Image (cartoon, rainbow, N blue to C red):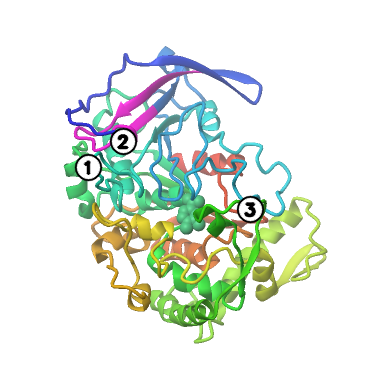
Amino acid sequence: MKAQEIYSLEFNPEKYTTETFTFEDKTYTVRAFEHIIYVANPIDTTYQQMNIYIPEDYFKGEQIRGFTRETAPIFFPNGVGGYMPSAPMSLNNQGRRNIFGQPRNGAQMPQPPQQPPGANMKQGSAIHYALAKGYIVASAGARGRSLQNSEGLYTGKAPAGIVDLKAAVCYLRYNADRIPGDKDKIISNGTSAGGAMSTLLGATGNDPDYKPYLQEIGAADMPDDIYAVSAYCPITNLNHADCAYEWQFNGIDTYQSRMFDMIEGIQSSGPTTRELTPLQIKTSNQLKALFPAYLNSLELKDDQGSLLTVNESGEGNFKEFVIGYVLSAAQKALNNGSDLTNIPWLTVENKKAVKLDFEPYVRQMQRMKTPPAFDAFDMDAPENHLFGTATLPAQHFTAYSYDHSPDKSTLAKTEIINMMNPMYYIGKKSSKTSRFWHIRYGTIDNNTSLAIEVILATWLKNKGFEVDFELAWDRPHMGDYDLDELFEWMDKAVKR
Ligand code: DHB
């Protein structure tokens, strides 16, 4: 929707409805402030809007678990998926979108091969969970890669999505006295592309690079840094994700075609296996060869201060370090009573997960994407479309794919590519990076490389941030599956 009028940035405390919901057999009453346009000059009023939910108890002067109207932290989940436009999440629709813009876990999504017991029990109920725990909830919509205005110009290409979420944070701060809650305790939450957005919010706080974009949409002139980050399977560090993917999947020469069938509109009842072409195999080899230089350039260190590296073949203590996280995930599953004795690539001795063979583990997980996984030669991956411009639907964003592209395509501007990469901003002088991070990635998620997640978490730790990072045993590409743990972590973080 196109908007021309100038919107007030002043929050109206009188404009709400009273809503109730039931969570774990208890009924809760909240004030719902919905469809708030959070910038003065919106480009798209369908997406640049926010929903805010506040427990009614706070308006009666009551406390919830020690939180008051003033001190309650603000849970800030986004519904971004596939870098598509996303509406704000609400009490009744907490479903996030997947890479195809469909509701996540909808009937059409490829279903994971095996679901851990209770996998979906609390899926999507993070908002109810937060409100029941006395958190205030604010969920902002954001523009995304497919959005066009009435003139056919693209209005949601990078960095629009992250700019919008920042603008919503600015709105909360601008209205600090009118909206209950502690604006210095904002905790973002997202899954996949939304997880990436969550990491960007945490990494890039107040960085001047985003200022002109915020000004353009009339965002409140306020700080946009946030307190803590929750990110599930963030699809991030996009400009290094191709070589990391081949570091992990090189040698797996088949892939599950479901995703490509869906993109091409082919109806199929389930995943079908296809072979990589000789060009794709060559590409995989070349991309894999680019990973060691990238990884080694980061000079990552483990908790003991040892340098993490790989040699030209991709072998080395960094690989062992990644395997260590998978083993920890297996150990947690064992401790919780799972039987992992029949997994051929995992050695369990005396209820301890002691050894994992990486190649058969990855082979069982299967390859989802063809090389290059993110910056596709034909520019038809979601990420190519993310890096389009007002007039170009898609662009390249890595030198490798640009150089190897068969046609004369264009490369996105470095500044824009960086603005979508938290790695570039974490600990940078001009950014106020969040102190607390909670990152999860499933051990059977093949949407990006495990290396991308381990690199992000280790980079953060090495720069002095407090990171709770785990791989989640047997989890596919999904989020919010461990809300008890997440909120326990959040409760501790907000008291620091
Ligand atoms: C998402 C998944 C992907 O595999 C990807 O490349 C980008 C986004 C998602 O689920 O949001």
Who's the residue at 31% across and 37% down the image?
168
Precedes in sequence: disc 1 or disc 2: 2
The magenta region covers 29-51
Q: Is residue 24 above or below residue 419?
A: above
Q: Earlier in the sequence, mark 3 or mark 1?
A: 1
Query: In this orientation, which residue lies closer to the viewer: 424 or 303?
Result: 424
**Secondary structure of the residue carrying numbered label 1:** loop
Q: Which mark is residue 151?
A: 1
Q: Are marks 2 and 3 in contact (CB under 8 Å)?
A: no
Q: Is residue 37 visible?
A: yes
Residue 402: x %, y % from top left: 33, 73
User: Of the residues shown, which amino acid type is indicated by label 2?
Assistant: Gln
Judging by the rendered image, the residue that carries numbered circle 2 is 48
Residue 437 seen in the current view: no
User: Label 3: few (<14), some or many (≥20) within 10 Å?
Assistant: few
Q: Amino acid at mark 3?
A: Ser
